[in-house]
Image (cartoon, grey):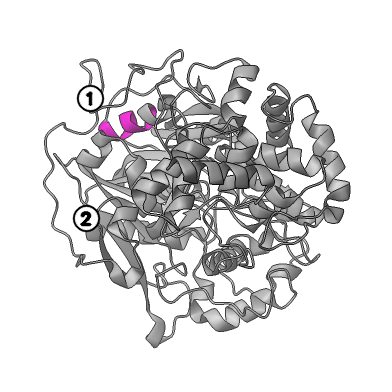
């Protein structure tokens, strides 16, 4: 992609990249095929998209007042911060990255005590009557209109790290008008008590859930979706907001729809991105070999689209067929050496290779790197694939075992909340047998009657929540509309196209929404697959220069890192990918030496 624009990029959390990983726990037959995912990826800017039924979309995104023909449901006047019962202070206790990483020193943090059993339907020991939720907030920077509560999905995703990275990618209108608020859901992250499991018992082991329940304690009986929904209402009340504005991703769309059903009079502007199957939680809901799931399996369709776009451009595998290359590598990947990668793994198993591909299908921003890795492996060198298997660029230093503590904790929370929501639906129930009964569990989407219709977003080739669920989800809500992003990846907002971004802004700002069913192209102004492939698989753009700069900043000062990045970014797609991935090929070493001489 060499036209100077940027695409959606990952949210940087500390020195790591918080990405959308797919970890399929299928190591043991007792383990359900649960896709462990997180929707905390973020965005860059793009030129605006256009499409039928989309009002006033075009040009650069900048602060714009409500149009004359808009039908706002919230006043355009300044809304003073309401009286809140939350005692906000600094975020050092929760490990917030430095201000130069998150882009601001304005974040505040707090804890909020909520009932462990908000429905008084279970047995709670006197010394465990409350859960302390970890909250964070960045106040509006201009004329305040309200607050937006963000949930990253999962289940098991932490809201604090997500929103700390997300803020930099939102429009000026939203930053000026709204406090940005999120929380680590009960049992997750900095909230306490936390879900706790024994590292010696891996997910999928027959004793895994039993050990988690033993270490987690009474909270195990109060983890299902309705308990987090009750927490959302506690947060709204503590913030002092009359209505809740909400941005929920993936599993967070389930929390949002459940909140709207439970508290319709408290619903403000809702955006639900990455909609699940609306029949989630029902006996006839989505399932895989007897294990209930959030949505249908979208990986086959996403991979087919990846292969189509790869085949459409010379910048991905040249004249080779992507499907054929991938099929061939699945059989011989374990025998390929990794001579130019110093970290782990030294070789890739077929399962690890599949994980790399699956991760690429959840985030198209790495496709340039994946194309180089596949091409190299097809020629007998799996070094670049090994680097990708070790983690996204910058996230895991070579030599790490490939799983950070945060990812491990996320997987534990994901499985525990899964069992809390779905245990009665499992057939057989072996995996979740040890999970105590949660009196309330996740429920299918039901019709709601809210003041402003809910905006549902689907991604056509979303591997985890396929886009065709979005119109189903909106229809089940009844008081909702939907739009579709024609991309590949898990969730769409923000950053891939202003066609989506402007619609989300319109929802929160009370402006006119696109016509239901509006489609937004993968990238602005590109309908031809060859051009689209050139953009998605080509290095040498602002994005690759930023990744190179981040790599060099670990060794050099800012000015020298920028110079080196600029020089290397003039090289071939393969060389740029090798340098980003720390693959020490001869071509990469020569390019680095030449860049050093120039700088």
Of 145 and 374, nearer the camera is 374
| Residue under the point 33% across and 18% down | 59
| Residue under the point 61% across and 32% down | 572
| Residue under the point 55% across and 30% down | 471
Q: According to the image, label 1 marks what residue?
A: 64
Label 1 sits on a secondary structure element that is: loop
Of 192 and 164, nearer the camera is 164
Using residue 476 as the reference point, say whether residue 377 is left or right of it. Answer: right
Using residue 514 as the reference point, say whether residue 397 is left or right of it. Answer: right
Q: Where is residue 349 in the image (x, y as percent from the top left)?
A: 80, 57
Q: Is residue 262 above or below residue 492?
A: below
Q: Position of residue 462 (x, y in %)?
A: 61, 37
Q: Position of residue 102 (x, y in %)?
A: 33, 53
Query: Which one is closest to the eye, mark 2 or mark 1?
Result: 2
For residue 547, say whether it is visible. Answer: no
Of 64 and 511, nearer the camera is 64
Q: Which region shows up in magenta? A: 503-509
| Res 106 label | 2
């Amino acid at each position: 992609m060499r036209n100077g624009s940027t695409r959606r990029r990952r949210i940087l959390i500390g020195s790591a990249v918080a990405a959308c990983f797919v970890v399929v726990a299928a190591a043991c037959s007792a383990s359900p095929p649960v896709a462990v995912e997180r929707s905390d990826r973020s965005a860059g800017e793009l030129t605006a998209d256009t499409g039928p039924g989309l009002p006033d979309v075009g040009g650069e995104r900048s602060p714009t007042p409500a149009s004359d023909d808009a039908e706002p449901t919230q006043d355009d006047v300044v809304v003073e911060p309401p009286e809140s019962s939350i005692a906000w202070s600094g975020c050092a206790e929760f490990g917030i990255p430095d201000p130069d990483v998150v882009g601001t020193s304005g974040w505040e943090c707090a804890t909020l005590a909520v009932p462990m059993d908000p429905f008084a339907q279970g047995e709670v020991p006197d010394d465990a009557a409350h859960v302390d939720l970890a909250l964070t907030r960045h106040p509006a920077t201009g004329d305040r209109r309200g607050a937006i509560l963000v949930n990253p999905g999962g289940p098991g995703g932490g809201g604090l790290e997500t929103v700390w990275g997300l803020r930099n990618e939102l429009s000026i209108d939203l930053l000026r008008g709204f406090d940005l608020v999120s929380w680590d859901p009960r049992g997750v992250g900095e909230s306490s008590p936390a879900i706790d499991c024994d590292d010696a018992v891996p997910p999928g082991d027959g004793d895994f859930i039993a050990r988690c329940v033993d270490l987690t304690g009474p909270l195990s009986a109060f983890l299902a979706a309705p308990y987090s929904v009750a927490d959302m209402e506690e947060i709204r009340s503590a913030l002092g907001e009359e209505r809740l504005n909400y941005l929920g991703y993936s599993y967070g769309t389930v929390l949002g729809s459940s909140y709207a059903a439970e508290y319709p009079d408290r619903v403000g502007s809702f955006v639900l991105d990455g909609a699940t199957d609306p029949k989630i939680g029902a006996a006839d809901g989505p399932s895989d070999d007897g294990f209930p799931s959030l949505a249908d399996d979208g990986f086959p369709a996403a991979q087919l689209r990846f292969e189509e776009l790869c085949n459409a451009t010379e910048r991905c595998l040249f004249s080779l067929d992507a499907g054929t290359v991938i099929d061939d590598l699945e059989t011989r990947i374990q025998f390929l050496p990794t001579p130019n990668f110093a970290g782990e793994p030294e070789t890739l198993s077929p399962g690890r290779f599949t994980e790399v591909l699956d991760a690429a299908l959840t985030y198209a921003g790495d496709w340039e790197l994946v194309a180089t890795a596949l091409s190299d492996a097809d020629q007998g060198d799996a070094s670049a694939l090994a680097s990708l298997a070790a983690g996204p660029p910058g996230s895991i230093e070579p030599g790490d075992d490939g799983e950070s503590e945060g990812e491990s904790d996320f997987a534990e929370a994901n499985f525990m909340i899964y069992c809390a929501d779905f245990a009665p639906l499992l057939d057989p129930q072996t995996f979740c047998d040890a999970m105590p009964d949660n009196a309330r569990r996740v429920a299918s989407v039901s019709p709601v009657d809210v003041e402003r219709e809910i905006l549902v977003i689907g991604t056509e080739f979303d591997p985890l929540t396929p886009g065709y669920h979005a119109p189903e989800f909106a229809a089940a809500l009844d008081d909702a509309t939907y739009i579709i992003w024609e991309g590949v990846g898990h969730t769409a907002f923000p950053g891939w196209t202003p066609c989506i971004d402007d619609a989300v802004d319109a929802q929160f700002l009370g402006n006119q929404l696109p016509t239901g069913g509006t489609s937004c192209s993968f990238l602005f102004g590109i309908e031809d697959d060859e051009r689209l492939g050139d953009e998605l698989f080509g290095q040498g753009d602002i994005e690759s220069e930023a990744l190179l700069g981040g790599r060099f900043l670990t060794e050099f000062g800012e000015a020298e890192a920028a110079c080196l990045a600029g020089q290397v970014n003039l090289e071939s797609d393969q060389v740029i990918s090798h340098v980003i991935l720390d693959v020490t090929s001869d071509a990469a070493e020569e390019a680095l030496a030449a860049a050093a001489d120039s700088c």
